[in-house]
Image (cartoon, helix red, strand yellow):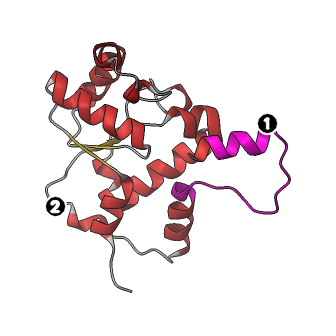
Amino acid sequence: MYYATLEGLRRFKIPHKFRFVSIITLYAQWIREGRLKVDPSWNKEGLRFTVQDPCKLVRQGIGDEVAEDLRFVIKAVAGEENFVDVWPNRSNNYCCGGGGGALQSGFVDNRRKYGELKFKQLMAVEPDVVITPCHNCHTQIKDLCDHYGGRWQTTHLWNWIVKALVNS
């Protein structure tokens, strides 16, 4: 949805007077400004986090800037020492195979086969949690984990922001 709106504004040169940003950018801004107070000390077990950079948001949308904000927020809520990045990452990250209508296409075996490279990439860093800011990525990454026998939780970023929130 973010990319479709962004691309519509670009392609059709629709004049607008608002700044079009991702919620991830706003989370990062609010944490930096101290308006959103988070503390990673809840993560006493040292859960290892990684992230799936969504193709439409990062590679085709905003670029590495939002990927950096995403990593900043994850490290702020889970602890910098508990974040492990996949390689390649950011604008060069592997597609999970769930976007572009693939989840709804009915070609489950093809989608899973395409996503096998992503599964192997994630398994290489042995995460406990994979953050997926995109709904399609979320469903695909969870399905790949279940299908190929991964051991991680697939979650959205806001779940962990809530976990790390502190009273001011």
Residue 40 image-quadrant placement? bottom left
Q: Residue at x 34, y 84 (%)?
A: 167
Tell me which amino acid carries mark 2: Lys
* Total tally of numbered discs in the picture: 2
Between 69 and 3, which is closer to the camera in this rendering? 3
Q: Callout 2 environment at 10 Å: few (<14), some (14 to 19), or many (20+)?
A: few
Tell me which amino acid carries mark 1: Arg
User: Spatial distance from mark 2 to mark 1, Cα to Cα?
Assistant: 47 Å
What element does badge 2 sit on?
loop
Label 2 or label 1, whichever lies nearer to me, is: 1
Residue 57 image-quadrant placement? top right
Residue 131 visible:
yes
Q: Is residue 148 left or right of residue 95?
A: left
- Examine the structure image and report whether residue 80 is included in the region drawn in magenta: no
- Quadrant holding the C terminus: bottom left
The magenta span reads: 4-25
What element does badge 1 sit on?
helix
Residue 51 visible:
no
Q: Position of residue 156 (x, y in %)?
A: 35, 51
Q: Position of residue 88 (x, y in %)?
A: 45, 25
Q: Is residue 75 above or below residue 136?
A: below
Q: Position of residue 63 (x, y in %)?
A: 62, 38
- Examine the structure image and report whether residue 14 is included in the region drawn in magenta: yes
Residue hosting label 1:
11
Q: Residue at x 24, y 45 (%)?
A: 48
Residue hosting label 2:
44
Q: Is residue 44 left or right of residue 35?
A: left
Between 6 and 41, which is closer to the camera in this rendering? 6
Between 55 and 33, which is closer to the camera in this rendering? 55
